[in-house]
Image (tube, rainbow, N blue to C red):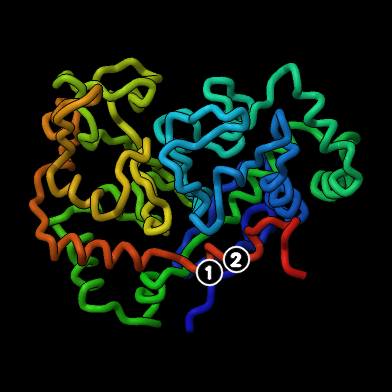
């Protein structure tokens, strides 16, 4: 049995990584440490870290669902619907960009400012009016003060928003998943069934062509790590919508276009990692496809044709659709085999690892 590799980073933190996983990239101003990771774990599950003390990061990122929430659209602390699905956090340390469609968010620290302080939509609900009070909740807890002092030694007043962001980011960087059946197959520890093998061959072959957007060790196409020299950050229009035949996507979910206003960026979103994909339904940026079987129907058709209602339009003919998405005509057997293979990407150890669970409910 091949053991996980133990790899030190530049600051001396020792990563326990699955075989063949590269050393993660960590910002120089937020080096990893065990006290910081443990503080971040507590804060990740802390409901007092929201405006009304009702919502934690973990409210929309459930471990048993690979840190998604099973909803088409997440719900913020004030009950407001988010326009997009909560993204899975497995291997988020390797993501070159964060969120569905913002090329400028390239660190967890910067990304976290959006759920904490964003107002459209409200997620954690922290704003100028309550910011000091929320911080006081944390700083008024003696156990938290001790954890901050351990995580950020030598600081006069370590309980700060900057350190909260750094600690949660450090915890999220430890959420590494690489113990699926497929990983064990690559290591020669298990064999795949006939259906799983056929699905694997379809996935990595030129018929289904899934590997073009999901071919990395993390089953996506935006990867960064400590040894990266060139980092590519592609975004894709998959033909999910084509409102009125104009190429448009529903507002406010128009992809990278929302930031650039460039017509060619309409409907472009990041390809999500497929690790643990069997437990992260519903799918797509807006949760508009309910099952893996339906996702494969969608890609087999080369896009989605919506025949009625406000979103009517033939996505297969979207003028901005990626050339990588075209009619495949997968048979029912092909689709069943692909689903069988995708289910081998579930990492049960990751979904139950006590190091990632709520420390307030941890088993002694």
Q: Quadrant of the C terminus?
A: bottom right
Disc number for residue 349 = 1
Give coordinates of residue 236: x percent, y percent.
28, 36
Viewer-side residue, 213 vs 192: 192
Query: Is residue 124 placed above or below 184 in the rendered structure?
Result: above
Query: Is residue 244 placed above or below 14 in the rendered structure?
Result: above
Q: Which structural element holds mark 1?
A: helix
Q: Which structural element holds mark 2?
A: loop
How many residues crowd mark 2 within 10 Å: few (<14), some (14–19), many (20+)? few
Left or right, 122 with reference to 237: right
Q: Which residue is labeled 2 in the image?
A: 353
> Which residue corresponds to the image point at 38% horizontal and 56% vertical from the top-left?
277
> Which residue corresponds to the image point at 37% horizontal and 37% vertical from the top-left?
285
Query: Where, by quadrant of the figure, is residue 140 drawn?
Result: top right
- Mark 2 near mark 1, Cβ–Cβ under 8 Å? yes
Give coordinates of residue 216: x percent, y percent.
34, 55
> Which residue corresponds to the image point at 26% horizontal and 78% vertical from the top-left?
193
Left or right, 128 with reference to 147: left
Give coordinates of residue 187: x percent, y percent.
39, 77
Viewer-side residue, 211 vs 254: 254
Query: Where, by quadrant of the figure, is residue 356 drawn?
Result: bottom right
Give coordinates of residue 86: x percent, y percent.
48, 41
Query: Is residue 278 placed above or below 125 in the rendered structure?
Result: below
> Which residue corresponds to the image point at 53% horizontal and 57% vertical from the top-left?
23
Quick check: can you spot residue 353?
yes
Quick check: can you spot residue 226?
no
How many residues crowd mark 1 within 10 Å: few (<14), some (14–19), many (20+)? few
Left or right, 111 with reference to 148: left
Query: Is residue 259 placed above or below 163 in the rendered structure?
Result: above
């Amino acid at each position: 049995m091949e053991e996980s590799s133990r790899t030190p980073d530049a600051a001396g933190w020792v990563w326990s990584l699955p075989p063949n996983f590269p050393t993660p990239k960590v910002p120089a101003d937020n080096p990893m440490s065990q006290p910081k990771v443990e503080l971040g774990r507590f804060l990740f599950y802390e409901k007092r870290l929201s405006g009304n003390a009702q919502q934690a990061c973990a409210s929309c990122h459930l471990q048993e669902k690979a840190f998604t929430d099973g909803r088409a659209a997440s719900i913020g602390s004030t009950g407001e619907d988010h326009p997009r699905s909560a993204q899975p956090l497995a291997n988020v340390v390797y993501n070159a960009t964060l969120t569905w469609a913002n090329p400028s968010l390239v660190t967890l620290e910067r990304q976290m400012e959006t759920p904490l302080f964003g107002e459209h939509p409200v997620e954690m609900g922290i704003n100028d009016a309550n910011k000091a009070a929320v911080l006081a909740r944390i700083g008024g807890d003696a156990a938290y003060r001790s954890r901050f002092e351990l995580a950020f030694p030598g600081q006069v007043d370590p309980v700060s928003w900057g350190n909260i962001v750094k600690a949660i980011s450090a915890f999220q960087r430890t959420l590494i998943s690489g113990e699926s059946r497929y990983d064990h197959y690559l290591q020669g520890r298990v064999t795949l069934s006939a259906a799983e093998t056929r699905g694997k061959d379809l996935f990595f072959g030129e018929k289904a062509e899934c590997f073009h957007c999901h071919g990395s060790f993390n089953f996506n196409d935006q990867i960064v790590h400590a040894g990266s020299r060139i980092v590519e950050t592609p975004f894709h229009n998959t033909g999910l919508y084509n409102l009125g035949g104009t190429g448009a996507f529903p507002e406010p979910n128009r992809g990278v276009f929302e930031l650039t206003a460039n017509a060619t960026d309409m409907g472009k979103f990041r390809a999500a990692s497929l690790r643990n994909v069997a437990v992260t339904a519903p799918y797509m940026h807006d949760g508009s496809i309910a099952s893996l079987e339906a996702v494969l129907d969608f890609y087999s058709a080369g896009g989605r044709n919506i025949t009625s209602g406000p979103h009517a339009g033939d996505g297969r003919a979207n003028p901005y659709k990626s050339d990588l998405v075209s009619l495949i005509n997968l048979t029912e057997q092909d689709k069943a085999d692909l689903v069988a293979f995708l289910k081998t990407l579930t990492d049960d150890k990751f979904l139950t690892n006590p190091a990632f669970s709520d420390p307030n409910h941890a088993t002694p």
